[in-house]
Amino acid sequence: MLEEGTLIAGRYRVVELLGQGGMGQVARCEDLELRRDVAIKMPLRRWLGSPIWEEVLTRFKREGHAAAQLAHSNVARVYDTGEHDGLPYLVLEYLHGQDLQSLLDQNPGGLPFEQVLELGAQAAEGLAAAHKAGVVHRDIKPGNLMLTADGTVKVCDFGIARLHNATSGLTIGVGPGTDAYRAPELFIGEPANPRTDLYALGATIFQLLTGRLDFIRKGRTVLALKADTPRELGTYLELLLAKEPDRRPSSAAAVAEHLRELRRWFASPAHPINKVRALLDEAVKHGEAGRHDIAVILLRSLVSDYLFGPHIDSAHPDALRVRQSLAYWAGKAEDATTARDQYSLLLSLQAHALGPGHPDTLTTLHKVAHWADESGDPAAIRDEFATFYLPIYERVLGPEHPGTLTIRNTLARWTDKTK
C-alpha cells in the first residue's frame, strides 16, 4: 500500500497520498535516483485474488502500454512500471495543478468561452497524438484532464484505453467510459474508435461552458448555452455531439485546428461582436459629449445591422447593452417614445435571460414605467404589463415582491389616467 515513507523498488519513497478511488490509489513519491517528484498508481490490495483481479491487472498493463507509446506535451507520461509486494504499479509524471473537474467545481456556472476553447484545443491535440499511435482513450471527461500550473492540459488515465488489435470489454457494465460522456453507439455495443473520443470531448466542452451535462433531452441534442457563447461555437459543438459518428469531425487534429481558428476569429476586430463593442463605445462617447442625437443614430444602426444577424443572440450581454444604451440616450435626447419602446424590449429580454427578479430587470421595469408616463401614452404598454408581466411576477416572485408591487402600482396609476 502507498503509505507515507514506504520505499518502492528501492527507488521511490512515498511522500503523501494524493487520492483513492474504488479501484486504486495514487501517491506523490520522490524518485531518489533522479531527485524528482513522480506519481505512483497502485490497485487496492482488497482486489487481490477477487473475481475481477484479472481485469484490474489487465487495466493496469493496458494503461502502461498505451501511455508508453505516447510522447506529447498534452499527454501525461508513464515513466516506469513494476510490482511491489504483489501489487503492480505505474510511475507517472507528477503534475502540479488540478483536473478540470476541480476547476468546474470552483466555477459551477461554467468557464469563459475563450478559456474553454484553449482547454479544448489542447485536449484535442493530446487525443490526436493518442489516435496517431493507435490508442483510443475511451474515458475523456473533465476529471481525466489535468491543467498544470503553466496552463498546459494533460490527457490522463488511459486505464481503459484500447490499442489496435487489443481486446475490448475489460470494464464492468455495458461498455467503456463514463455514461454521461459516452457516444450513443457505445450503448448498442459498437466498438470504441477515435470519433467516440470526440463525442466525449464535445460533452466535456459543453460542461466546461455551462457547468451542466443536460444536452440530451427526449433523445435529442439540445445545446442550451450561455447567452455570451458565440453561435459558431454552438454549431460546432452540435457536430461533435452528433448521434451519427460520420457527422462528427474527421479527426482530433481537425478539432484542435478548428477550435484554435474559432478563438482567433472571436478575438478578431472583424468579428461582429467586436464590431458591436467598438461602435457601442463610439456611440457612448458621443452621448457623453452631449451629442445625444448622434448617439441615438449610431445605436439605431447597431440594432438594425447586427442584432438581427446570424452571429449575435438577442440575449447576448452586448446586445442587451446596445438596447439599454439606445433607451438611455433616446431619453437624454428627449425622445420619450423611443426610450419607452426600447426599455420595454429590454425588459422582455432581461426577464427571459436574467430572470424577473434580477436587479437589472427590476431597474428596467422602473424605467419602462417612467418613460411610459413621459411619453404620455401609457396605454401603449398597459395591456402588456397587465397580461404578461404581472402574472409572471406574481407566480415567480410572489404577490408582495417589490417588483410585483411596482407593476401593481404602475397599473393603478395608468388606469386612473385613462379613466
Image (cartoon, grey):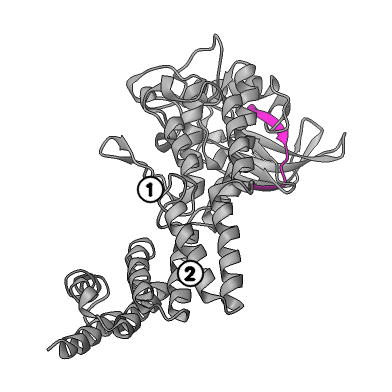
The crowd level at tag 1 (other Cα within 10 Å; few <14, some 14-19, many 20+) is: few
The label on residue 296 is: 2
Residue nearest the observer in this picture, 353 or 418: 418
Residue nearest the observer in this picture, 24 or 348: 348
In the image, what residue occupies the spot 49% across and 56% down? 108
Distance between mark 1 and mark 2 Cα atoms? 33 Å
Which quadrant is the C terminus positioned in?
Answer: bottom left
Q: Is residue 302 above or below residue 193?
A: below
Element type at marker 1? loop
In the image, what residue occupies the spot 64% across and 46% down? 268
Residue nearest the observer in this picture, 194 or 37: 194
In the image, what residue occupies the spot 47% across and 16% down? 168
Q: Is residue 388 left or right of residue 12?
A: left
Residue nearest the observer in this picture, 18 or 321: 321
Instruction: Report which quarter residue 60 is drawn in.
Output: top right
The x and y percentages for residue 210 are 46, 50
Which quadrant is the N terminus positioned in?
Answer: top right
* Residue 237 appearing in the image: yes
The label on residue 224 is: 1
The x and y percentages for residue 165 are 54, 8
The label on residue 197 is: none
Q: Is residue 348 left or right of residue 321?
A: left
- The stretch in magenta equals 84-98
The crowd level at tag 2 (other Cα within 10 Å; few <14, some 14-19, many 20+) is: many
Total marks shown come to 2
Element type at marker 2? helix
What's the amino acid at mark 2? Answer: Val
